[in-house]
Amino acid sequence: MPDADHEVAATRRILFARIAARAGERDVLRAERLLLRGLQRQWPDALISNLLHGLLARAMPGTPRGDAP
């Protein structure tokens, strides 16, 4: 796996872990479905990351989008 692919996968894992650690069960399940759907449908990595960023921001009001990778 090229370095860029590792970096993208690591970013997704970090975002998902932040959601899992900070959000409620409903948001965690939503993030899990979003991630699996995106991977299954081969959405661009940037789209998946942006959607996870948005979910994290909604789950944790007052959290700036810029603090996540």
Image (cartoon, grey):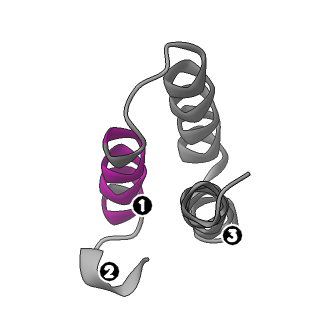
As rendered, which of 10 and 34 lies closer to the eye?
Answer: 10
Q: CA distance from mark 1 to mark 2?
A: 8 Å
Q: CA distance from mark 3 to mark 2?
A: 14 Å
As rendered, which of 3 and 43 lies closer to the eye?
Answer: 3
Q: Position of residue 48 (x, y in %)?
A: 41, 41
Q: Give the SS element for disc 2.
A: loop
Q: Amino acid at mark 2?
A: Thr
Q: In percent of the image, x 42 and y 50: which residue is there?
A: 52
Which dot marks residue 56?
Answer: 1
* Label 2 neighbour load within 10 Å: few <14, some 14-19, many 20+: few
Image marks 3 and 2: residues in contact by CB distance under 8 Å:
no
Horizontal side of residue 17 vs 34, given as left or right = right
Image marks 1 and 2: residues in contact by CB distance under 8 Å:
yes
Q: Amino acid at mark 1?
A: Leu
The prevailing secondary structure element of the residues shown in magenta is helix
Q: Position of residue 45 (x, y in %)?
A: 42, 43
Q: Which residue is mark 3?
A: 21
Range of magenta residues: 47-57
| Quadrant position of the C terminus in the picture | bottom left
Most extreme residue toward the bottom, as rendered? 67
Which dot marks residue 63?
Answer: 2
